[in-house]
Amino acid sequence: MDEAQARDVLAAAGVLPAAAGGARLLSLGENAVFAAGDLVVKVGRDAELLDRARRELDIALWLAEADVPAVRAAEPKPRLVDGHPVTVWHRLPDAVRPAEPRDLAELLRVVHALPAPAFALPPRELLGGVERWLRLAGEAIDPADAAYLRARRDGFATAAAALIPHLPPGPIHGDALPRNVHVGPAGPVLVDLETFSADLREHDLVVMALSRDRYGLPAEAYDAFTAAYGWDVRAWEGCAVLRGARETASCAWVAQHAPSNPKARAEFERRVASLRDGDESVRWYPF
């Protein structure tokens, strides 16, 4: 789904107060996210994401009832428009500053203290999207690279299932990065709730450890994160397993963009090569 296709779905949904063509595109990935007026609208890539859209709205209501600072839904149920799930959200006030790792840590402490909701949260299927992303990549990537990632996925899935956690399992955000925190006039709030899960709390902490090692997060920023949270996941013997699983998933996620974006293909090839070589010093770039 490219921007033009997403705008067509947005127009067909008829949820914005003005013409869809004037909506601002905020991001384009598995969802195209548009903003206009007081609303934000997410257009899912295809109907496979409908159940996830339903769950994200349930999670938003649960977090609102628990008074957790998070984005709030403007409609309680998703729409299915031309085969695409569409969800509508209240637009947040403009950010007063970029989110920092310590902001994320403070929100994670709140989330990790929550009891389970009345509805079932799924486990964090970190590797569950690998097959779909590789399928979307098609012939744009080397079949040998796809086979390598499938084998790596299977190995890390088995290893992760045997982990003994340090923290008590429970609700997690699932994609805990500063980009999923918005700092408005009232303080930091969580956004992008679709990966909320019930699983090892360590999943949320390994993300930032990988950001330090692969994506150039300064050591002092990571130290501020661990200080605010109160624990460094790198002290846990299972850290390498969850890190390896996330690297595998992150590599496959980029692959889905390779057919239409040469930069994505180059980044995918960089990542796969570093995994094959076992070189943890190779810098990866956000995409």
Image: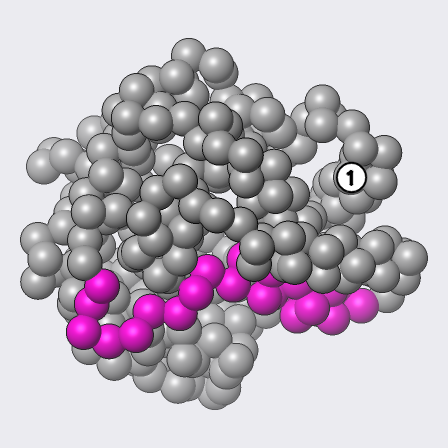
- Residue 257 appearing in the image: no
Specify few, some or many for label 1: CA neighbours under 10 Å numbering under 14, 14-19, or 20 or more: some
Verify whether residue 135 appears in magenta: yes
Q: Quadrant of residue 56?
A: bottom left
Residue drawn at x 62%, y 49% is 245
Majority secondary structure of the magenta segment? loop
Residue 69 located left or right of residue 6: left
Q: Start and end of the magenta stretch?
A: 116-138
Residue drawn at x 53%, y 71% is 45
Q: Is residue 175 above or below residue 59?
A: above
Residue drawn at x 54%, y 67% is 4
Q: Is residue 11 above or below residue 94?
A: below
Residue 35 picture location, percent across and down? 31, 57
Q: Quadrant of residue 263?
A: top right
- Amino acid of disc 1: Leu
Q: Is residue 197 above or below residue 180?
A: below
| Residue for badge 1 | 275
Q: Which is more toward the observer, 43 or 18?
A: 43
For the N terminus, which image quadrant?
Answer: bottom right
